[in-house]
């Protein structure tokens, strides 16, 4: 009977240890995961692909802005371009895109 009790305590202690380790892992993910994702975002925003993709998106919005006739649609496009450029360096834009924004 004593061996049975020891075996049950052993398995319960393993279960509790696994639970505590998992909870600690979730805490680490909650703390370090945010920092890791921030670092990945900062690195991505410095890449050439991100910069060229943002410029291409703004150029496409400028072309759509020139095609549209509705004042409400133009206003929405203008604010969409401003929103996408809020975290982008304005000096890196080509001159024709800057002209479109003004």
Image (cartoon, grey):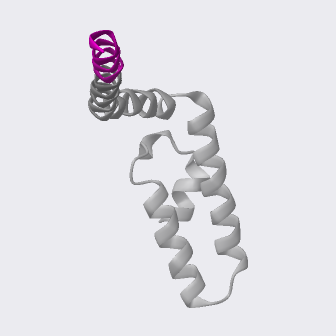
> Residue 102: where, in percent of width, then height?
47, 66
- Please, is residue 64 above or below residue 99 in the view? below
Would residue 59 be found to the left or right of residue 87 on screen? right
Would residue 7 be found to the left or right of residue 73 on screen? left
> Residue 100: where, in percent of width, then height?
56, 63
Residue at 51% from the left image edge and 81% from the top image edge: 75
Quarter the N terminus occupies: top left
- Please, is residue 32 above or below residue 52 in the view? above
Q: Nearer the viewer, residue 23 or 55?
A: 23
Residue at 66% from the left image edge and 49% from the top image edge: 56
Residue at 43% from the left image edge and 47% from the top image edge: 90
Give the quarter of the image for residue 69: bottom right
Which secondary structure is most common in the magenta stretch? helix
Q: Nearer the viewer, residue 11 or 86?
A: 11
How many numbered markers are drawn?
0
Q: Which residues are magenta?
A: 1-14
Q: Report the residue that reaches farthest toward the front.
A: 1
The answer to whether residue 13 is magenta is yes
Q: Report the residue that reaches farthest toward the right.
A: 67
Would residue 60 be found to the left or right of residue 82 on screen? right
- Please, is residue 89 above or below residue 29 in the view? below
Would residue 36 be found to the left or right of residue 94 on screen? left
Give the quarter of the image for residue 7: top left
Q: Nearer the viewer, residue 58 or 93?
A: 58
> Residue 24: where, in percent of width, then height?
27, 26
The answer to whether residue 84 is magenta is no
Residue at 49% from the left image edge and 39% from the top image edge: 92
> Residue 66: where, in percent of width, then height?
68, 74
């Amino acid at each position: 009977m004593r061996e049975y009790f020891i075996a049950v305590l052993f398995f319960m202690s393993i279960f509790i240890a696994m639970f505590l380790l998992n909870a600690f892992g979730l805490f680490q993910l909650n703390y370090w995961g945010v920092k890791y994702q921030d670092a990945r975002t900062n690195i991505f925003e410095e890449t050439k692909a991100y910069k060229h993709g943002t410029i291409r998106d703004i150029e496409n919005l400028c072309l759509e802005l020139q095609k549209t006739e509705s004042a409400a649609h133009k206003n929405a496009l203008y604010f969409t371009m401003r929103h996408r450029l809020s975290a982008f360096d304005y000096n890196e834009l080509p001159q024709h895109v800057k002209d479109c924004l003004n």
